[in-house]
Amino acid sequence: MSRLVVVSNRVALPNESRAGGLAVALQGALEEHGGLWFGWSGKRVREASSKVHGVRSGNIGYATLDLSRREHDGYYSGFSNRTLWPLLHFRLDLVQYSRENLQIYLDVNARFADALAPMLREDDTLWVHDYHLFPLGAMLRERGIGCRMGFFLHVPFPSSDMVAALPGHGALFGNLSAYDLVGLQTRRDLERLQDYTRLYGDGKVLGEGRLHARGRDFRAAAFPISIDTAGIEAQAQKSEHHPTVRRLRASMGDRQLAIGVDRLDYSKGIVRRFQAFDHYLTTHPDHAGKVTFLQIAPSSRSDVAEYQALRTRLEGLAGSINARHARPEWTPVRYVNRNVTHDVLTGFFRAASLGLVTPLRDGMNLVAKEFVAAQDPENPGVLVLSRFAGAVYELPEALRVNPYDIDGVAEAIAVAADMPLAERRERHASMLKTLRRHDITAWRRGYLAALGTASA
């Protein structure tokens, strides 16, 4: 393959930690092919500047731009997080739209295009990531860039009617036709993109995953992202001996641990998860003292009122559940509102008998996959998984639940807590086999191979 150029909202520089699976995958792809990683530096400055910061490590170049405070507030905090994020997670009621923020979003993408275009070669392969950069490909085409271009959307693609409710939707989603290959997490996302293209995108569907819009044919397909399965397995085994993990195990005694790990966000369904655990304790009094629920939910976007309100509500729910159900020797809910290092987290997963992954909507949800990979195959825990997480299509052996159904989730928790060892082993073995076959390396190689055959 020719030189690979990766574009993402943030760039993982060589001296930064790469705990995230995506950063590791992109780094691996760049090391394999040699190339360039371009995006925002993460820095906010007083005034916008066209200066590109460059650094090199081995066969990879890193190029970043700073954003002005106004650009950050309009492009990132405003349009990306207050408009596109809720829209893409099916929460039209939470969308905050302004023409000013849309214009800043478009202006930042144009500034990225202006800075990146001179660095590109005709035989490059360009891979753009996520909703922050929807229009970048079209803007590069306008600047005469003809190289092969791919785009990957890490979050869900919503129903066509919801997309069409966004003012100016055509200036964003219609421009996906500038890419040669649009990657999505699931086949349902692909179906919704095809519907949008046909109904509102002034285009047509030529066949499964073959579309035409704005005078261009392009392809779209599902490429479910995954994890470093072998790495998680090894890390979880090693982390069993971490002092923090050992203290957690000791504090549990002979009780089972149920764990939820999410960035603090309304899309993760944490409020309903708390309510379901409360209902489980109420409807299964014989389980009193049997299960302790640990929810780890570090704050995100703490400057946004909706997230502040969510944190306050979860703190109140945890307190009220414990007030109703706790015993002197047992606290039913442990709520942690801060980051836990990844090595400790995998150790927690291995210690847990239940994994509660119940988002209201999620593109994939890698926590579900990491929970499975971290388990002890001889005595594995049970994954309770939302039907609205992309991971459900690859992990059908999980206990699938509707997160809006409090009774159903509560019953699934009870079933998981009582599941016999033989059934737990059978379910886990099947899921682990899938994750070993379709790991993060297979994901990025599969995408790039498909992009390589897409017409430039």
Image: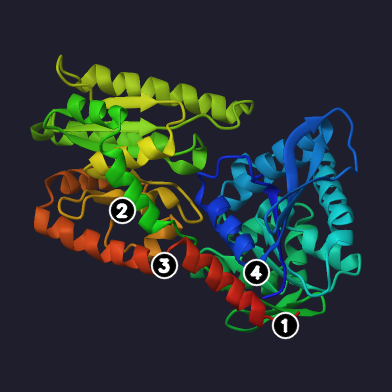
Residue underneath mark 4: 182
Give whichever of discs 4 and 1 has the lower sequence position. 4
For label 1, the residue is 455
Left or right: 188, with 301 as reference point? left
Q: Cα distance, mark 3 to mark 4?
A: 20 Å
The amino acid marked with disc number 2 is Val
How many C-alpha atoms fall within 10 Å of the one at disc 3: few (<14), some, or many (≥20)? some
Q: Nearer the viewer, residue 431 or 360?
A: 431
Q: How many marks?
A: 4
- The earlier-in-sequence mark between 3 and 1 is 3
Asked where in the image residue 49 lies, by quadrant, the reply is top right
Residue 268, position in %: x, y?
A: 46, 42
Expressed as whole percent of the image width and height from the top left, the position of residue 69 reads 81, 30
Closer to us: mark 4 or mark 1? 1
Q: Residues within 10 Å of mark 1 (few under 14, many from 20)?
A: some
Where, quadrant-wise, is the N terminus in this rendering?
bottom right
Could you tell me if residue 300 is visible in this image?
yes
Write down the residue under mark 3.
438
| Residue most extreme to the front | 58
Identify the secondary structure beneath mark 1.
loop
Badge 3 amino acid: His
